Image (spheres, rainbow, N blue to C red):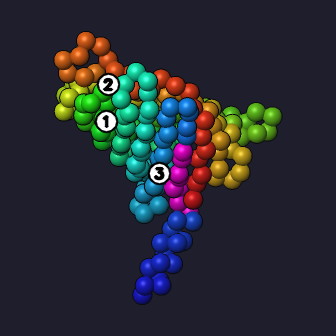
Amino acid sequence: MKKIVLFIVFVANLVAYHRFEANINKDEFEAKLDLDLAQFIKKAPIERYIVGADYIYIENDNIENDSLKSINLMAKGRLPNFHTITIGLGTRFVTLDVAEKDVTAIPLGIYANFKMPIFGLPFALSTEYFYSPKPLTYSDGETFSEQKYEFSLEVIDMGELFVGYRIIEASIKNSVQDVTLSENGYIGFRIGF
């Protein structure tokens, strides 16, 4: 029985769209793992149900070393009649350690990806934006937002290299201005399994 269960898990993973991603710049490191749950739902009405975890470590001269941890949930699918465009809607549970304050947020977000072959090479542009207003931001925080812009190239099947730009901001209670955790470019890789 144990061998049968392991075999089913192995085969299910072969047709899944699980991904691991890592990116860096001189002050930050991000690691992300996404698992596709749509494979386990018969006749899923959407292409992908993604559950993931994300960790960003930020070492910054202006503020103490900070980190962002999140658990993500997103539904993604191709637009009808536009097979090169994928959109997604989702949410996250985010915890931040920033400027010696703890911020917890549940931002809502949108994702878009446009695949565009250039000279026969599989390039893609993608963006995502998450925002948490005051009612969805807790602890020492008032608001939270994160936005990303990426340009990627699939160098091997299920393997991408990318460059991107990320902005992460949080409003802290009793603070005169927003705290910008990250406003930097980065490079990274993404592999599917």
> Which residue is the extreme one toward the top?
176
Amino acid type at mark 3: Leu
Q: Give left or right: position of 113 versus 144.
A: right
Question: How would you rate the neighbour count of disc 1 (Cα within 10 Å): few for under 14, some for 14-19, many for 20 or more?
Answer: many
Q: Is residue 18 magenta?
A: yes
Provide the residue designation for mark 3.
33
Residue 158 spot, x, y in % from top left: 64, 52
In the rendered image, the quadrant that contains the N terminus is: bottom left
Pick the front one: 98 or 112: 98
Pick the front one: 8 or 33: 33
Provide the residue designation for mark 1.
96
Q: Which residues are magenta?
A: 15-22
Amino acid type at mark 1: Leu
Query: Which residue occupies 68% across, 44% down?
Result: 154
Residue 117 spot, x, y in % from top left: 73, 36
Q: Is residue 23 magenta?
A: no
Q: Quadrant of residue 41?
A: bottom left
Residue 91 spot, x, y in % from top left: 34, 39
Query: Relative to residue 49, is residue 186 depicted above or below?
Result: above
Whole-angstrom CA distance, mark 1 to mark 3, is 18 Å
Query: Which residue occupies 40% across, 48% down?
Result: 53
Task: Assign a secondary structure to mark 1.
Answer: strand
Query: Which residue occupies 30% across, 39% down?
Result: 95
Query: Relative to residue 9, is residue 122 depicted above or below?
Result: above
